[in-house]
């Protein structure tokens, strides 16, 4: 049975220059894991913190190995180039985290087709492309995992009606979990989804989803990082095809105090979408 550690493992994480992706990378780096930071931001952004290079330094400072790769997951060529670079530097890939995502909480008439295409190309197509590129190496890994940051599949009207295009794009990521878990179960690659109970304090929330008031009702990205760690250190043949909610998973794993994850202890928490 694999040890409950990510020491020496190589994680390919999309959108890892900030937020949840970076938090997952930092948690793994504390074990001595190698983190491939596959993200678009190579130069500082006026409204968003962090670049692939600042993330790489944080990963190394935390005790991990780092490889910063400029990757737009809409580009199959960029994805495959980054996968090749990761294998050349670290010898293989043990874990893929499909974290990169685009959001637009707009109704049908308010969603430009350009925005529709962006969400589907990054969320669903990007997840599929990264999975396809990593699977040949995951097949050779000792305890291979793919983790998609996407919601539980639930075909109820209430999840679709407010923002059909976004829901379709996020559920597309979850459908990859459902299908690939079955397709690769016998090969021993785990495919799971992880989604937060509450809003998570990220730059997207700060800039797009309500600012400081929403941040007060949010939890820190570290709750998702700790939940991801719990999944990724489980035996892959015994943990696949699941749609996990962060606090349910951690509670079942023995966590009793969730106050440490709140950005403003005591504040009312804001539920996330799809929960």
Image: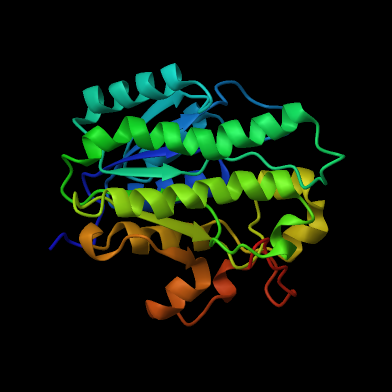
Quarter holding the C terminus?
Answer: bottom right
Quarter holding the N terminus?
Answer: bottom left
Q: Position of residue 85 (x, y in %)?
A: 30, 21
Q: Position of residue 84 (x, y in %)?
A: 29, 22
The answer to whether any part of residue 17 appears in the image is no
The answer to whether any part of residue 225 appears in the image is yes
Pick whichever, 51 or 189, lies toward us: 189
Q: Is residue 171 above or below residue 56?
A: below
The residue under the point 50% across, 28% down is 73
Q: Position of residue 58 (x, y in %)?
A: 45, 39
Q: Quadrant of residue 231?
A: bottom left
Task: Single out the residue that lies furthest toward the left.
Answer: 1
The residue under the point 17% across, 61% down is 3
- Left/right placement of residue 3 relative to residue 66 reads left
- Left/right placement of residue 28 relative to residue 214 reads left
- Left/right placement of residue 167 relative to residue 60 reads right
Total labels: the figure holds 0
Color theme of the render: rainbow
Q: Is residue 41 above or below residue 191?
A: above
The residue under the point 87% across, 40% down is 109
Q: Is residue 109 above or below residue 223?
A: above
Pick whichever, 261 or 229, lies toward us: 229
Q: Position of residue 149 (x, y in %)?
A: 51, 51
Pick whichever, 93 or 188, lies toward us: 188
Pick whichever, 163 or 218, lies toward us: 163
The residue under the point 60% across, 68% down is 197
Q: Quadrant of residue 97?
A: top left
């Amino acid at each position: 049975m694999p040890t409950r550690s990510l020491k020496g493992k190589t994680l390919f994480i999309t959108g890892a220059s900030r937020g949840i992706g970076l938090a997952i990378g930092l948690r793994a780096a504390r074990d001595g894991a190698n983190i491939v930071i596959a993200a678009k931001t190579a130069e500082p952004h006026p409204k968003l913190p962090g670049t692939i290079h600042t993330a790489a330094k944080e990963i190394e400072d935390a005790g991990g190995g780092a490889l910063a790769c400029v990757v737009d997951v809409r580009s199959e060529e960029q994805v495959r180039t980054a996968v090749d670079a990761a294998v050349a530097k670290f010898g293989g890939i043990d874990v893929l985290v499909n974290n990169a995502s685009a959001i637009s909480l707009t109704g049908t008439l308010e969603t430009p087709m350009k925005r529709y295409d962006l969400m589907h190309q990054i969320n669903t197509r990007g997840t599929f492309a990264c999975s396809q590129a990593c699977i040949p190496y995951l097949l050779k890994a000792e305890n291979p995992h793919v983790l998609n940051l996407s919601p539980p599949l639930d075909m109820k009207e209430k999840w679709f009606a407010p923002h059909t295009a976004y829901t379709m794009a996020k559920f597309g990521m979850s459908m990859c979990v459902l299908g690939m878990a079955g397709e690769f179960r016998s090969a021993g690659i785990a495919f799971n989804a992880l989604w937060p109970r509450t809003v998570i304090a990220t730059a997207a929330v700060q800039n797009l989803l309500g600012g400081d008031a929403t941040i007060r009702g949010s939890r820190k990205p570290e709750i998702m990082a700790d939940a991801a760690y719990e999944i990724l250190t489980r035996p892959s043949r015994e943990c696949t095809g699941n749609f996990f909610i962060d606090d349910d998973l951690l509670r079942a794993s023995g966590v009793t105090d969730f106050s440490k994850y709140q950005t403003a202890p005591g504040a009312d928490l804001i539920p996330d979408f799809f929960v």
